[in-house]
């Protein structure tokens, strides 16, 4: 028997070795178009970044060692260029261009995938790279050693793009990442990707989401990258990582059938549409076990498994069926680990598959044992029987074991109830007696059986705040720090005594920090006769992270100078620094501990507090802004924030005193360009001084916060009329005076640009980045037929009560 294997890496090398193990007599030829076989593609980014120091370690076998060990005729730099199934022959081209034929009895195709090169002007210029194989790696590594690369850009925020962003950062470059979608890591849901966004920006990566590269230009020894938004970024190096597609060009005219996704169609035995030709790896499509729809799965584990199965079927006849892969993947993004298995909510929605989801925040191991780190788990499951459909997990430790357990359950057809039954090895350094996946199972079970109706962070943004009652059951301190606009604070422990304050005729949305106290509040309310109650899934932690604007270009400063100089100086001055360990505490634990510790020290002394809560850096900054203390430094290492704060002069001003009344509110009633500019200049100024700033957009003011590209929305006749008559977005706003049929506003924008004054759109963006709260008036939206989808994502919808609550806490309220 004569076997020919096309492709000598993951699937191909596995199959060749397996065939030899079960068939010692056969002839095996392995054809590889590159120079190398059996190497670790997955290790390539880490070699570039210097974590893997020796190039040799990337090679599991050389052609000679593989050939000797397995008695395989390994032919590198031999590319298969055509297949003639009728004659059982293939045409091969050697590196010198010479061609020859080879016959086979059985053929295995494992040609992998080829990177997509987007059709962008200048994409082929020097300094722009792809990463797929050893040759690409050597070329990129060589460039890094022979050029000064201070700035690097990664285009594409998938798994490989993110690994490369981290590894280029390790080479000492300032890295920016451009991604077309509004999130990185397409196989996970937005709220989970938000953890990655936060972490990347904390590490100094400049994130440009919902952006596309339109052109590359060479300017002296640099590359100028033009983005769709009009931004231009100078860089020394670009890595393109926008995806791959099956390598099937050489199959043209072979008669081998391709599937609807463009991958090679195979049957359950991994045999193609042509007898005796098998295919495995990145190049094939196979039905997804959950959806039963064909899909492409570019991962190493399935390629290896398929290689072994196909080998068995080629030698013994078709006997082993392939069960399919559900896309279990994991990536390290600096200190964070992100893993996924099965289907995320957005994919299920796209496929119109009914699902429910749960979000739980736990710790990697027992809270009381040092260095326990936060872990967030999202489950998707079928509403009728709780069958697990997918899971995503983000955190710093123990992510792999959780996702692997769930992957196994999904492949076995398990339900959320099975998660509760998983028996895990427990000791405090490794997990908790109630493991995060059991907690995920309990919460999902409660959602499923109706004992805890939930609302998602996305739905929460859409709720009509006038017709519903938003109940925040966190402590007063947590609420004062940050809360959902329009919510009322009744701490859980006071709830039973304050039930009379809660309306009985409205839908109640309860929320807390992570969802647990919200659940307890919901149980109290329901048993006390409130019928319409829902809990915010994942609590304020998920909500606030998901709606937080992603800071990007501000981070173009030196990412390797994360330590704040003031902090270093303070340490050197030998001032009194009290160390506080708040690791393992969930929000608001660290802030409360900080507040308490601060009360115990003198003005001018410092607290150095460490926390593993990912939102703590943001919270600590907000807390310092509102209390008059000085945040001196903020470092982040292996999931632990260490923040140095000097006790400020405003001693009496803390979470529970009058600092809140220093806020500023603006009512933006007009949609005149000049008035909008003035409003945002003032709001940005106020926010820059750390004051809580709110702009309430009402009536014509709504036009200032409309998206430029809006989705199509259903409107009644009056809504449609308003749409025709009103400016469709901010670029269409007119001046209040001297508009002269639009010439005035164009002139104004031109002069501002010439004089380097920020445009309205960039002032608005700055405001969002500074966390100025933008509230759209619910009533005005109703009257003018404006839909939520037409407004910027960062806008929340609120009513008069929301505004009044903000105005109460402000000492300047302007009507513009
Ligand atoms: P490959 O391993 O790509 O092998 C295909 C081989 O076929 C290539 O060497 C190619 O030169 C050769 N070939 C193609 N056409 C011909 C032809 N006509 N004639 C002869 N030879 C041909 N997966 C994970 O699960 N985890 C990870 O962390 C991970 N990291 C990755 C990092 C990088 C940088 C890359 C590039 C991939 C990564 N992957 C990862 C994906 C994983 O490597 C692939 O899914 C896996 O290698 C696919 O195996 P394969 O045999 O189908 O293709």
Image: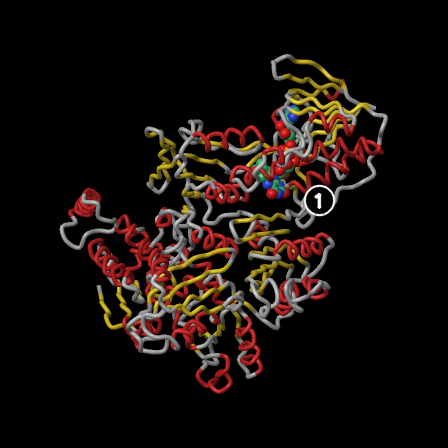
Give the labeled residue for mark 1. 324
Label 1 residue near ligand 1, CB within 8 Å: no
* Residue 161: x %, y % from top left: 51, 41
Quarter of the image where one finds residue 624: bottom left
Please tell me how many numbered marks the rendered image carries: 1
* Residue 22: x %, y % from top left: 84, 33
The answer to whether residue 282 shows anywhere in this view is no
Q: The N terminus is located in which quarter? A: top right
Quadrant position of ligand 1: top right
Q: Nearer the viewer, residue 403 or 337?
A: 337
Q: Nearer the viewer, residue 11 or 379?
A: 11
Quarter of the image where one finds residue 773: bottom left
Could you say whether the residue bearing mark 1 is in a helix, strand or loop?
Answer: loop
* Residue 51: x %, y % from top left: 55, 42
Q: The C terminus is located in which quarter? A: bottom left
Horizontal arrangement in the rendering, residue 360 relative to residue 664 (left or right) = right
Q: Residue furthest top?
A: 98
Horizontal arrangement in the rendering, residue 307 relative to residue 804 (left or right) = right
> Measuring 76% from the left and 32% from the top, which residue is drawn there?
17
Residue 159 higher or lower than 524, as above or below: above
* Residue 530: x %, y % from top left: 53, 80
> Measuring 53% from the left and 43% from the top, which residue is drawn there?
163
Q: Residue furthest left?
A: 738
């Amino acid at each position: 028997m004569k076997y020919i294997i096309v492709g000598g890496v993951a699937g191909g090398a596995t199959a060749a070795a397996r065939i030899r193990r079960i068939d010692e007599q056969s002839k095996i030829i392995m054809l590889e178009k590159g120079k190398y076989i059996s190497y670790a593609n997955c290790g390539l980014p880490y070699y570039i970044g210097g974590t893997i120091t020796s190039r040799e370690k990337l090679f599991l076998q050389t052609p000679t060692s593989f050939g000797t060990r397995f008695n395989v005729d390994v032919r590198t730099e031999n590319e298969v260029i055509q297949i003639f199934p009728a004659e059982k022959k293939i045409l091969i081209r050697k590196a010198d261009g010479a061609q020859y034929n080879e016959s086979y009895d059985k053929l295995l195709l494992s040609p992998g995938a080829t990177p997509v090169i987007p059709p962008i002007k200048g994409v082929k210029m020097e300094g722009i790279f792809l990463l797929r194989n050893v040759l690409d790696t050597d070329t990129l590594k060589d460039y890094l050693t022979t050029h000064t690369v201070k700035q690097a850009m990664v285009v594409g925020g998938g798994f490989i793009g993110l690994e490369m962003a981290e590894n280029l950062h390790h080479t000492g470059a300032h890295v920016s990442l451009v991604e077309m979608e509004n999130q990185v890591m397409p196989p996970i849901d937005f709220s989970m990707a938000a953890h990655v966004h936060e972490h990347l920006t904390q590490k100094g990566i400049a994130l440009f989401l919902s952006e596309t590269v339109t052109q590359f230009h060479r300017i002296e020894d640099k590359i100028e990258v033009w983005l769709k938004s009009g931004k231009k970024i100078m860089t020394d190096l670009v890595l393109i990582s926008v995806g791959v597609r099956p390598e099937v060009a050489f199959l043209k005219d072979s008669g081998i059938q391709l599937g609807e996704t463009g991958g090679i169609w195979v049957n359950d035995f991994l045999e193609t549409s042509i007898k005796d030709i098998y295919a495995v790896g990145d190049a094939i499509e196979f039905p997804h076990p959950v959806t039963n729809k064909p899909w492409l799965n570019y991962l190493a584990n399935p390629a290896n498994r398929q290689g072994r199965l196909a080998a068995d079927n080629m030698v013994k006849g078709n006997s082993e069926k392939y069960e399919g892969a559900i896309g279990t993947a994991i990536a390290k993004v600096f200190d964070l680990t992100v893993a996924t298995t099965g289907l995320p909510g957005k994919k299920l929605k796209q496929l119109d598959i009914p699902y429910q989801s749960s979000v739980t925040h736990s710790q990697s191991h027992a809270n009381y044992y040092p260095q326990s780190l936060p872990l967030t788990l999202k489950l998707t499951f079928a509403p009728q029987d709780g069958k697990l459909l997918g899971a995503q997990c983000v955190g710093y430790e123990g992510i792999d074991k959780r996702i692997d357990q769930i992957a196994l359950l999904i492949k076995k057809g398990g339900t959320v109830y099975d998660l509760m039954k998983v028996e895990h090895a427990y000791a405090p350094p490794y997990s908790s007696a109630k493991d995060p996946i059991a907690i995920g199972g309990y919460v999902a079970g409660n959602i499923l059986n109706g004992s805890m109706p939930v609302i998602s962070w996305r739905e929460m943004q859409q709720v009509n705040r006038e017709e519903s009652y938003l109940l925040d059951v966190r402590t007063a301190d947590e609420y004062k720090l940050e809360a959902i606009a329009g919510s009322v604070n009744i701490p859980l422990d006071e709830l039973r005594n304050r039930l009379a304050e809660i309306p009985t005729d409205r839908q109640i949305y309860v929320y807390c920090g992570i969802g647990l106290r919200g659940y307890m509040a919901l149980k109290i309310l329901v048993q006390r006769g409130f019928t319409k109650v829902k809990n915010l899934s994942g609590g304020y932690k998920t909500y606030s992270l998901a709606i937080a604007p992603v800071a990007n270009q501000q981070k173009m400063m030196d990412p390797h100078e994360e330590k704040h100089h003031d902090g270093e100086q303070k340490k050197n001055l030998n001032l009194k620094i009290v160390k506080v360990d708040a690791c393992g505490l969930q929000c608001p634990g660290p802030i409360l501990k900080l507040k308490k510790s601060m009360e115990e020290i003198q003005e001018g002394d410092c607290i150095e507090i460490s926390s593993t809560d990912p939102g703590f850096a943001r919270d600590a900054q907000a807390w310092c802004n509102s209390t008059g203390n000085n945040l001196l430094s903020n470092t982040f290492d292996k999931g632990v924030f260490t923040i140095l704060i000097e006790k400020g002069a405003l001693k009496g001003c803390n979470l529970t005193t009058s600092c809140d009344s220093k806020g500023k509110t603006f009512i933006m009633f007009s949609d005149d360009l000049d008035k909008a500019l003035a409003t945002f200049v003032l709001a940005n100024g106020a926010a820059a001084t750390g004051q809580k700033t709110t702009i309430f957009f009402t009536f014509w003011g709504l036009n200032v916060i409309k998206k430029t590209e809006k989705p199509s929305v259903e409107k009644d006749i009056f809504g449609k009329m308003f749409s025709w008559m009103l400016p469709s977005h901010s670029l269409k706003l007119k001046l209040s005076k001297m508009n002269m049929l639009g010439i005035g506003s164009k002139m104004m924008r031109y002069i501002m640009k010439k004089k380097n004054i920020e445009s309205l759109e960039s002032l608005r963006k700055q405001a969002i980045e500074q966390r100025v709260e933008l509230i759209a008036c619910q009533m005005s939206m109703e009257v003018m037929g404006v839909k939520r989808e037409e407004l910027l994502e960062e806008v929340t919808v609120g009513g008069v009560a929301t505004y009044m609550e903000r105005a109460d806490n402000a000492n300047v309220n302007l009507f513009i």
